[in-house]
Image (tube, helix red, strand yellow):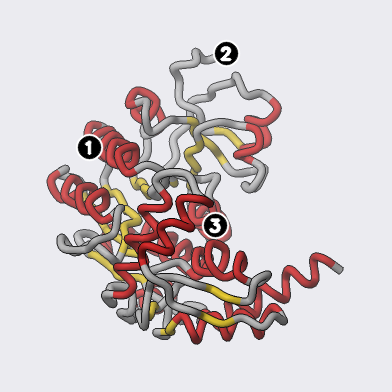
Amino acid sequence: MPSPAAILCVPAKWVQLYPSVWLKSECMILVTGASGYVGSKTLAALSRQGFPAAGMVRTTGKRVAGLSAETPLRIADYDDPRSLLRAFEGVSTLLLVSSDGDGRDLLGHHANAIEAAASRKKSSIVFTSIIDIDADSPFYFTPVYRDAERRLRESGLTWTILRCGLYSDLVLDTWIKPALSSGVLSLPTDTGAVAPISRQDVALAAAAVVASPMQHAGKTYELTGPRKLSFHEMTEAAGSAFGHRLEFAPCSPADYLQRAWAEMQDPWPHAFSTLCRSIEEGRYQRITNACEHLTGHPPTDFRKFVEDTAASENAGSN
């Protein structure tokens, strides 16, 4: 049996059954954050198209549950550079899907992954960044992503950056669904609008890029939804889809922050309050055709997204 220092690249069902077994193998494409939505859906898209790809996860067990049993996995931790070096062995294209959490942790995660990829001399690295990247942005995570983009450009690697707009999933799950019971969504975004894009569409765009990375070398794509919507429009659409009366009521930043402190752990009160300010300043309302250019079809409109989500949840409860 190979030593634990060897590289792991085995089907997920093997990892669940034999978590201590490490097998040597080479995989052309490695997707980090494979247990998350974007990572897992990117892997699924690559698998459907027959591309050799593996997912990187931190642990086995429940974190593997969302992946196909046939998905090859490599185990590594962003905080452990040695594990990253092992995971990147034999990989020619890396999709670095950013994690979340404390900004200082993310800064280190990005730095460790990019340094490990550069030391392994990966031929290409694709990074999921954010559209709100300007130096004067108030958003909590903007400096983190600006740093990662700088490191990529200075790494000597062939790179592609996917700057993602605000996720439709985040708007729905974090803000709209919790407001359904009260009938009022209250955020300090004033009249700010967004062009939300689903994580599914981002995953399909990412799969298209890592499948032919040299065609996209040195390019930065802004991935947005097809339509700019106000929060009044989004709450109306979601209320109709879920069968609830729902309205949007702007609030002050101080009121929102006080409420967030009572409901969330750090860093999320600060992160979401600064995100709202960024939305108010119009930093998420841009519309691009990059997703359609990469995938061959337009991204899902937010109204359709919430209708499909509501229909799926209703079907699941019956």
Alpha-carbon span between mark 3 and mark 2: 32 Å
Alpha-carbon span between mark 3 and mark 1: 26 Å
Instruction: Report the residue marked by disc 1.
Output: 118
Q: Earlier in the sequence, mark 3 or mark 2?
A: 2
Residue 95, how many percent across, how many down?
38, 49
Camera-side mark, 3 or 2 = 3
- Determine the secondary structure under disc 2: loop
Q: Residue at x 80, y 65 (%)?
A: 316
Alpha-carbon span between mark 2 and mark 1: 30 Å
Mark 1 residue type: Ala
Instruction: Report the residue marked by disc 2.
Output: 1
Residue 82 in sight in this render:
yes
Mark 3 residue type: Lys
Per the rendering, the mark at residue 165 is none
Residue in the foreground of this view, choosing between 266 and 5? 266
- Determine the secondary structure under disc 3: helix
Horizontal arrangement in the rendering, residue 162 relative to residue 241 (left or right): left
Which of the 4 image quarters holds residue 229?
bottom left
Per the rendering, the mark at residue 41 is 3
Horizontal arrangement in the rendering, residue 200 relative to residue 141 (left or right): right
In which quadrant is the N terminus drawn? top right
Q: Residue at x 51, y 45 (%)?
A: 34
- Determine the secondary structure under disc 1: helix
